[in-house]
Image (tube, grey):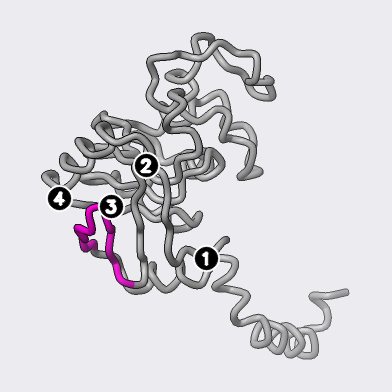
Amino acid sequence: MDKFVRLEGLVAPLDRSNVDTDAIIPKQFLKSIKRSGFGPNAFDEWRYLDVGQPGQDCAPRPKNPNFVLNQPRYQGAEVLLTRANFGCGSSREHAPWALLDFGFKAIIAESFADIFFNNCFKNGILPIELPADEVAALFQQVEATPGYTLVVDLAAQLVLRPDSHGIPFKIDPFRKECLLNGWDDIGLTLRHAEKIKVFEEKRRAQQPWLFA
């Protein structure tokens, strides 16, 4: 998992509440567990005018010109701005996989569904909860300013607007440490690789029949 320390990224506004995980990555794409390759199908039913299928080449598919993420001004966005209860619905981990593969590294919202919120941290995405008035102000500025960028400073726990207005956010200290160091669950385990090796060698000596 890549480290998340400080991000200065273009912002894309998804002005919807209660965006569920089936909208983020529809059910037909859940057959793969590779964690990669889901970006072209993120928000598939909203981005395209036809019905997508796993393994399909998305390049020739007709896109919905009215969907915000298809607009040229938001191409390459790394920060997703949205509303309340983002990531509700089923617990599929494919949702953060799709968002990360699409290019989003941080998501700002009024609130998140719990399981999606947890899954973001496990996959290197920083979900940031901000007060409704701050989110509303960000929407106004993003939509009024082409090329609008935000600085997300995890170490300082601060979202910095172009007008130098800083917005503090809260984060669990353990989750913060994991993101700063790029530790997912496997990375956390491998920090104890030497102890695990010693344990396995001891077990092999004491219970050799298990390794016959």
Identify the magenta region: 156-169
Mark 2, Cα crowd under 10 Å, few <14 / some 14-19 / many 20+, is many
Q: CA distance from mark 1 to mark 3?
A: 24 Å
User: Residue sitting at 49 percent across and 22 percent down?
Assistant: 44
Q: Quadrant of the N terminus?
A: bottom right
User: Residue sitting at 71 percent across and 89 percent down?
Assistant: 198
Residue under label 4, please give it.
Answer: 131
> Is 75 above or below relative to 168?
above
Q: Helix, strand, or loop for circle 2?
A: strand
- Residues tagged 4 and 1 counted as in contact (Cβ below 8 A): no
Q: Amino acid at mark 2?
A: Val
Mark 3 and mark 2 lie on one chain; the one further toward the N terminus is 2
Residue under label 2, please give it.
Answer: 11
Residue 16 in which image quadrant: top left
- Residues tagged 4 and 3 counted as in contact (Cβ below 8 A): no
Mark 1 and mark 3 lie on one chain; the one further toward the N terminus is 1
